[in-house]
Image (cartoon, helix red, strand yellow):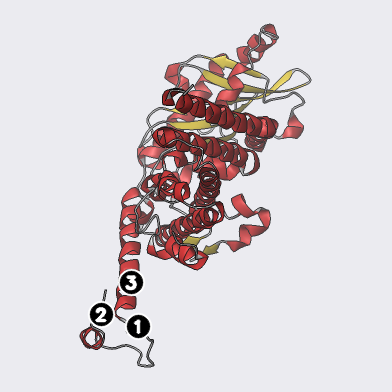
Amino acid sequence: MTSSYGKLIKEGLWNNNQALVALLGLCPLLAVTNTAINGLGLGIATTVVLVLSNVTVSLIRNVVRQEVRLPIFVMVIASFVTAVELSMNAWFYELYKILGIFIPLIVTNCAIIGRAEAFASKNNVTDSLVDGLAMGIGFTLALVVLGAMRELVGMGTLFSQAHLMFGEGARDLTLSLGDGFQGALLAILPPGAFIGLGLLIVIKNLVDQRLAERPQPVKSEPEKDPKETDEAQPAGA
Amino acid sequence: MIKHPIFAAGGLLAAFAVGGTGLVAFTHQMTDDKIAANERNALLASLSEMVPASSIDNDIVTDTVAVSDEERLGTAETLVYLGRKQGEPVAAVFTSVVPDGYSGPIKLLVAVKADGALGGVRVVSHKETPGLGDKIEVEKSDWVHGFDGLSLGSPPEERWKVKRDGGIFDQFTGATITPRSIVKAVKKTLLFYQDRGESLFQEKTAAKGEGDTVATSKMAG
């Protein structure tokens, strides 16, 4: 398979973003993203688990027998998730209380078993590490952006409760649109999560479309009518 | 001799189960004390907001008594933290539950001082609507501070209602049910204290050493 890290990273962050393209792990994605910091917290926890499980699965890929690989992957993932949960409980207690049930639920995040099965079980350790990291960061970015969107629209703040994660000094990180801001409540409620995710996917697809329409050797002409561009570059997507 | 594949697979699974359990056990070992300390500190912090640490000299986190009065305290069994100074009652903190919140039960801490006045009220957990009903959280609004220092006599009992019902407590725009149900629950807790407050401290002294600290862990969530 591929050995180019650049490609792996691009896959994880953009082309095969687990949240926006694969649409995996929607339960935590939609549930905790009412603030950017919550999203960041769950994203980091997911990334840690993903990296650990990818590396482990890759290490044991030649030992594990085909017929029992899935239970073993699940066991590996569940152990790591429990370890991460206990660690967060010990060192990020306030954040842990907010994320609550969604930390253990990382076990059921299909993105993790998905990467273990689709990538780590077939690739060497460093590739799997990079893949886990890239996929995890891609997932985290989606969570943070969605969280920031909902927080900003719904409550008029950004990075509220940053001190839960970065210590008391980070209190000033919180941006606010002012006390007079009447948030659109919908954004905070569950439907807001679905709408927000939908918008993010739309944006991503629009960007992809633009990129595909652009002629391969980047010309100096800035924006052209899409039809014209198509004729000039019939290869297309 | 060729081993049957099922044994190889089973052995492999067992090996990973042992490894995974080992990892979890190790992490648990490393974090156990820290987690217990966190929970204790969090509880202590919220208790001492209402019952200042300087006003008591006992260990309020473990000095507890369980009482049962579903009608007035909202659950079948309610844990009460007792604050004393030199053995004299200072305050009792009830883990009352509001059974009729807008979207499910609301867990409270209600601190009642020995003279029957409120030391304070805090919302421990709730599922009220974000942006409307969640102004009951002390981080979001100072509404709960409106209870500080009140008692059954002040305001008079019939004024223990939200303003819309002719009482003295603010309701929120768009959310009347939440404050209404909390006011009712706090009042009922005060009524309970009026009836049985004194005996709480005595029961505890009498029952000392009967291992009634078990319930402390229930408060963690």
Q: Are marks 2 and 1 in contact (CB under 8 Å)?
A: yes
Q: Nearer the viewer, mark 3 or mark 2?
A: 2
Q: Given the image, what chain letter belongs to the residue carrying mark 2?
A: A
- Outermost residue toward the front? B1
Which quarter of the figure is the C terminus of chain A placed in?
bottom left
Discs 3 and 1 lie in a common subunit:
yes
Place residue B176 in its image quadrant. Answer: top left
Q: Nearer the viewer, residue A231 or A221?
A: A231
Q: Nearer the viewer, mark 3 or mark 1?
A: 1
Residue at screen point 46% across, 42% down = A106
Callout 1: helix, strand or loop?
loop
Give the amino acid type for the residue marked by disc 2 in the picture.
Ala
Q: Does residue B190 lie above or below A35 as drawn?
A: above
3D distance between C-alphas at marks 3 and 2? 16 Å
Q: Nearer the viewer, residue A129 or B218?
A: A129
To which residue does mark 3 refer?
A208
To which residue does mark 2 refer?
A235
3D distance between C-alphas at marks 2 and 1? 10 Å
Is residue A4 visible in the rendered structure shown here? yes
Q: Of the residues under marks 3 and 1, which one precedes in the sequence?
A: 3
